Image (cartoon, rainbow, N blue to C red):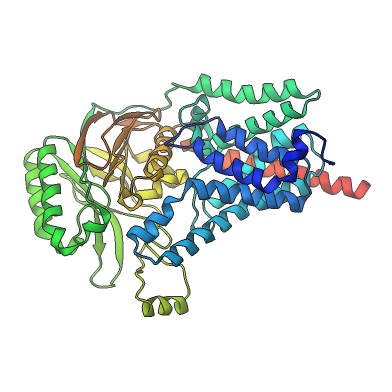
Amino acid sequence: MPAPDGPVSRLLRHRRLVAALAGAGASFAFAPYGWHFLAWLAPAVLFLLWEYESPREAAGTGFWFGAALFGAGTWWIYTAIHDFGQAPVWLALFLVAALLAIKGSYYALLGYLVVRIAPDPSPVRSLLLIPAGWTLMEWLRGWLFTGFPWLQLGYSQSDTPLAALATLGGVHLVTFGVALSAGAAVVLVRGGGPRLAAVAAAAALWLGGWLLDGREWTRPAGAPVSVALLQGAIPQDEKWLAENRAATLERYRALNREALGARIIVWPESAIPVLAHDAGIYLEAIRRESAAAGSDVMLGLLDFDLGTGEIRNGLFSMSGAGDGWYYKRRLVPFGEFFPVPEAVRKWMRLQSLPYYDMTPGEEYQEPLRAGGQRLAATICYEDAYGAEQLAALPASTLLVNVTNNAWFGDSAAPHQQLQMARFRALEAGRFLVRATSNGITAVIGPDGAVADRIPQFVPGILKASVVPRTGLTPYARTGNGPILGFAFLTLVAFTILRIRARRTG
């Protein structure tokens, strides 16, 4: 479609800059900023550019939007790789640049396909095809090549009525609602007869979320349970120093003693700088003190298999009902495993660059027992993967997540992860308790709201009472299938129409 005169024409002359600014602006829709309207306003700018672009041009603007979104929203990756991971500056910059290029490519592919499939701008393209494509794109980048589901549009709506849609279709349904709202904004800007229909379509989703807000899909399964979440606030660059080991062990033991009496005490991910087989005496002392006070303890711990040499990132539950382990399944690329060829590994050894590979846990693991409850567990950024917890939900009454956020310093990362964790509680209709190394330690209610939290970067204990719940939300029953199936069929239908149009044209 030829570009018009006026403001849109000026935007098109600087389309890549405009797309990059829109992408960077979209990052402020997420925590800790919370300007949630940018989640639909920024993509609306991109959609408007696509109205006047060829498939190749749409790929270019899509790329710059995506690269800028992740550049502005995940700059803390550099901190983790360089400041705490001890990688040289050039390598940290290379890895960050590679991530931005990869993530930008997803948005480029979306732009190319949308304009290729439906080259003529229309309200139905803005309101249906692009939102469906965007939803599939975000799902794809959430699992392909281990996945990185950060900054999915739906998460930005944690404090708006749209969030309630997650009980029906998870975060991807919320994403679809945000993208449809962006499409409605484009229809309004372009004008014409379908304005009312565009407003009605967006309003229907927002109204649906408002009506669902407060709807309880699960029910209490017993009396409230007291929990205590420990936050040691040990700096990452000091944690594994041999001279600090005794002080770290003593800090967590002191915090645990202060928390005694709570039915469940939770320590953060890899809380103590000792492997499980070397911590036997220490753990037994913790067990005796806790059991005497009627407390079960769950603590993050690295487990080393002396027979195979494998190391796992685990959550160890010392409970009166029996001990149990949960092992992390989703490992962090270039943090917990290095997906590189052996030739690169040899080079890294020669350069004395730090690297090691952990072993992931089994795909399905039974919920852990503690405090008379069964807890579906996740470690670190596993709480960014909504579908990962679905199999454990029928047998679980609570959710637990342990995290080490010391890698990211004082950045947006802990706030973004807490925002994603809120969706896991909402999707499950259960309380989620999160113990983190230096924040944000929090208790999240089954409605996705933060019930309580403690300040970052200071040692502390969060004491709370949570209600175990049973039953399943619609999303817990069906998973991502319905919304992804609808989005896929939408793309197929548009593709078929395009093929027929070309044959008859």
Most foreground residue, 317 or 64: 64
x 61%, y 37%: residue:
42
x 42%, y 63%: residue:
334
Most foreground residue, 364 or 428: 428
> Does residue 330 appear anywhere in the picture?
no
x 29%, y 65%: residue:
311
Most foreground residue, 42 or 221: 42
Q: How many numbered markers are drawn?
A: 0
**Which corner quadrant of the image does residue 21 belong to?**
top right
Q: Is residue 149 above or below residue 228?
A: below
**Which corner quadrant of the image does residue 81 belong to?**
bottom left
- Residue 108, given in percent of the width and then of the height, sits at 66, 52
Quadrant for the N terminus, please.
top right
- Residue 375, given in percent of the width and then of the height, sits at 30, 41
> Does residue 91 appear anywhere in the picture?
yes
Left or right: residue 280 compared with residue 168: left
**Which corner quadrant of the image does residue 302 belong to?**
bottom left
- Residue 289, given in percent of the width and then of the height, sits at 7, 45
- Residue 414, given in percent of the width and then of the height, sits at 37, 43
x 46%, y 49%: residue:
74
